[in-house]
Image: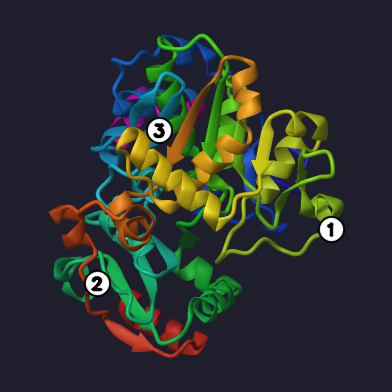
Amino acid sequence: MRFISSRSNNPEQQVPFSEAVLRCFPSDGGLYVPAYAEDLSPWINYMTDETSFTSMAGSLTQALIKEEFSPIISEAIATSAFPFSPKLRRLDDSLYVLELFHGPTGCYKDFGISYLAACMDHMLLMQGKKATVLAVTNGETGACIANAFRGRKNLKAVLFFTQGAPRGFTESDLVQNGGNILPVEVESDTESAFQMVRQIYAQPELVEKYGLTLANTVNIGRVLPLVFCYIYAFSRLKAHTVGSIYYSGFAGNLGNLAAGLYAWKFSLPLNGFITNTTADLILDQMDKCKVMDAVIPLRKRGIADVAKPSNVERIEEIFQASPAVMKGLVFPANVYEEDQERACKDAFMKYGYLMDPETASSWAAARKRSDLVDEYDGTTVLIARNDPSLSQHEIRHWCGEAPEMSDKLLNVYQPCDAVRKIAPDVDAAVSVMREFLD
C-alpha cells in the first residue's frame, strides 16, 4: 500500500509507508491517507475467534504493507508491538464492548503508539537512521510513549509534560542514564506547550537534524493499528450474529472513527458507525451527518495542526467523492453530560459493568440511534478506549462505586521528576533538546 496527502489527487505524489510514518507531515499541509483501498476480505473471512490479535496484526501488516515488509518482518513487528490484546465482552445478545484498555497503560493509545514504535524501529534499522518523537502530554500519552519506546535503540522521545504531569518512565529510561526518553516539564498550560511544539516543527533544520516526527494521530502509523482492532472484534462476533453490525465510539479527535472507516474501505462487513456530535461532526436539519469544514475545500485550508490533530480531514477525504455515502454510514447523536451519567448508571445496574465516561457516551449515542440497529435486528459494539479505573472520580459520582486501579496502573501513573523544567519558550525547549540529543 502507498499513501498520499489528503489534499492531493496526483498519483506521482504517493509515498511508501516508511515515508508516511517517518516524515509524517505532507509538504502541502494535509494528512497522509491510504492512496487506495485494499481488499482484505480473504484475510477477514479466514480469521476466527481462535486467531490471536498478534497473529492477526502480523497478517494484516503483511497484506497492507507487502511492498516494504516481508511476512517474517511483519510477524516480528506485530510480536514486538502487541504482547497485549483487545477483548470483546458480551453484555447481552445485541450489545458488546470492544475493550481497548488492556495494554500496559490502560489506554487505547497503547495500540497505536506501540505499533508505531515497532514499525519505526525496524524502518530506521534498515535505513541506518535515528528519529526523535516530539509529544505534548498531561501524563497519559507520555506514559504510553515511554513504555512503547523503552529499549528501542533507534528511537528517542522528547516529552513535554504539562506542569505537575510527568509520569510513566523510570530512571533507566532517561537519556542521561543511557535510555532514550527526555521528559521536560513545561511550566504552563497545555495550549502553550502545543504552541511551542508547533514552533519547533516549523524549523526544517531541526526536523532534519534530529529526524523529528510525531506520535499523535497526525502520523498515519498511529491510526492504522486501530483498523486491526475493528477486524479483531468482527472475528469474535461473526459466529454469533447474523444481523447488522454497528460500532459506537467516542468521537475525540475522530481518529477511532477514521480507523473504522478505513476498515470498512478494506472490506470489513458492517452497517455503520455511531458517535457523539462534535464541533466538526454535527447533525444537519434532517438528522444526517454533516462535516462543518466541508464548506471549505481541502486544498484551500491552512496547514493541519501538528500538535493537536483532528482527523476530520481524513474523514472528509474518504467521502469527498460521495457525501451521500457518509450520511448513510456515520450516525452522530447529541450526547450531554446527563446522557453519559444515565448510561453509566444503567450499565452498572443492568450488567454490573462500570463504564468510563467516554464509553458511557458511546452507549448514550447508540441508545439515541437505536432505531437504526433495531430495524435490522442488529448488534452494537461499543468502543471502550480507557480503563474505567482512570476515571474513578466520575464513576463514583455517578454510580456510587468505582473500580480499583490495579497495581500495574498505580505504578505506571506514579508522579516522576522531569529532567528539566522550562518556561513555555521555544528557545528554552530547543536548548534542552540540543543538550541531550547532540
Q: Residues within 10 Å of mark 2 (few under 14, many from 20)?
A: some
Label 3 or label 2, whichever lies nearer to me, is 3
Q: Which residue sits at x=36%, y=13%?
A: 48
Q: Quadrant of residue 84?
A: top left
Helix, strand or loop under label 1: helix
Across and down, in percent, residue 106 comes to 29, 50
From the image, tell me which residue sits under label 3: 97
Amino acid type shown at disc 2 = Val
Q: Nearer the viewer, mark 1 or mark 3?
A: 3
Residue 259 at x, y percent in the picture: 55, 38
User: What span is colored magenta in the figure?
Assistant: 64-77
As rendered, which of 393 and 32 lies closer to the eye?
393
| Residue at mark 2 | 175
- Residue beneath the point at 54% across and 77% down: 191
User: Spatial distance from mark 1 to mark 3, Cα to Cα?
Assistant: 40 Å
Horizontal relation, residue 162 to residue 255: left or right? left
Q: Amino acid at mark 1?
A: Lys
Residue at image point 35% right, 51% down = 107
The mark that comes first in sequence, 1 or 3, is 3
User: Mark 3 is on which residue type?
Assistant: Val
Asked if residue 143 lies left or right of residue 19, the reply is left
Numbered label attached to residue 361? none
User: Residue 300: which disc?
Assistant: 1
Quarter of image, res 316:
top right
Q: Tell me the CA gap for discs 3 and 2.
A: 39 Å
Q: Residues within 10 Å of mark 1 (few under 14, many from 20)?
A: few
Nearer-the-camera pick, 91 or 239: 91
**Spot occupied by residue 391 in the image (x, y as percentages of width and height):** 34, 58
Does the CB distance between marks 3 and 2 fall below 8 Å?
no
Circle 2 — which element? helix
